[in-house]
Image (cartoon, rainbow, N blue to C red):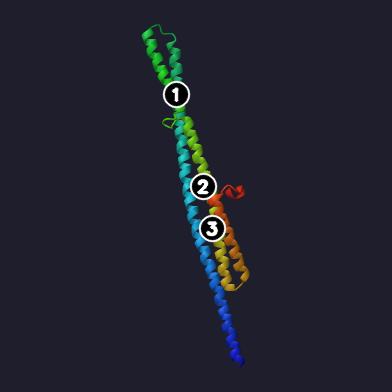
Amino acid sequence: MSEIHEAIEKAQEGEHGEGFNRRIALVIAILALCLSFSETLGKGAQTEVVTKNIEASDLWAFFQAKDIRRTVVSVAADQTGLLAAGLADPAAKAAIDKQIETWRQTAERYESDPKAGNGRKELEDQAKGAEEERDLSTAKYHHYELASAAFQIGIVLASAAVITGMLALAWCAGALGAVGLALTALGLFAPHAVPFLATL
């Protein structure tokens, strides 16, 4: 009789262990799914950082080129105006004054050209906008990376819970999953809400 009871108890323990392992396997699957989302979002944010950094760099280079052109044209107008001051021929003076006015208009257009959107002022605004987008994507990326780390550690702890049967490891894995979800949500909706995390 005692052998039958022992066999029944072992079978019940096996069923209990099997149920525990199934629940932990489900936790691992959920953590892996969340990890794939955070990794995908992180890779997208990382790509956006590079893209916006290149865009800002290009815009600042264009800004510098406009500034150099504006300076050259302004200097040419000023220098020509000084040289023309001594001219006695009215026709030559009129031609030079016309050229000086053209250069001054060109210099003004290089400074600000709202119609074309590529004056120095417009380029500066565009470059600063690209830098802001880059910084936002950088903050998102940091959140997604931290979330991925939390999910990965959670998966390791959950796997260890299957091997050891320790329930505490499973709870820690679930807690890390919750932390990972919170970090992912912060990255999506409020990447600058916690400034400390955005700089890690």
Q: Which mark is residue 137?
A: 2
The amino acid type of the residue labelled 2 equals Ser
Residue to which mark 1 is pinned? 107
**Of all residues shown, which one is farthest toward the bottom?**
1
Distance Cα–Cα, label 1 vs label 3: 52 Å
Residue 200 visible in this rendered orientation of the protein? no
Percent of width and height locating residue 157: 58, 66
How far apart are labels 3 and 2 at the CA level? 16 Å
Residue 9, position in %: x, y? Answer: 60, 85
Q: Which mark is residue 148?
A: 3
Sort mark 2 into few (<14), some (14-19) or many (20+) by Cα contacts within 10 Å.
many
Secondary-structure class at tag 1? helix
Q: Earlier in the sequence, mark 3 or mark 2?
A: 2
Outermost residue, left direction?
91
Q: Point out the image quarter for the N terminus.
A: bottom right
Q: Which residue in the rendered view is the most extreme toward the right?
A: 168
Q: Is residue 195 above or below residue 105?
A: below
Q: Residues within 10 Å of mark 1 (few under 14, many from 20)?
A: many
Ranked by sequence position, the earlier of labels 1 and 3 is 1
Could you tell me which secondary element the residue under label 2 belongs to? Answer: helix
Type of amino acid under label 3: Ser
Q: Secondary structure at mark 3?
A: helix
> Separation of disc 1 and disc 2 at Cα?
36 Å
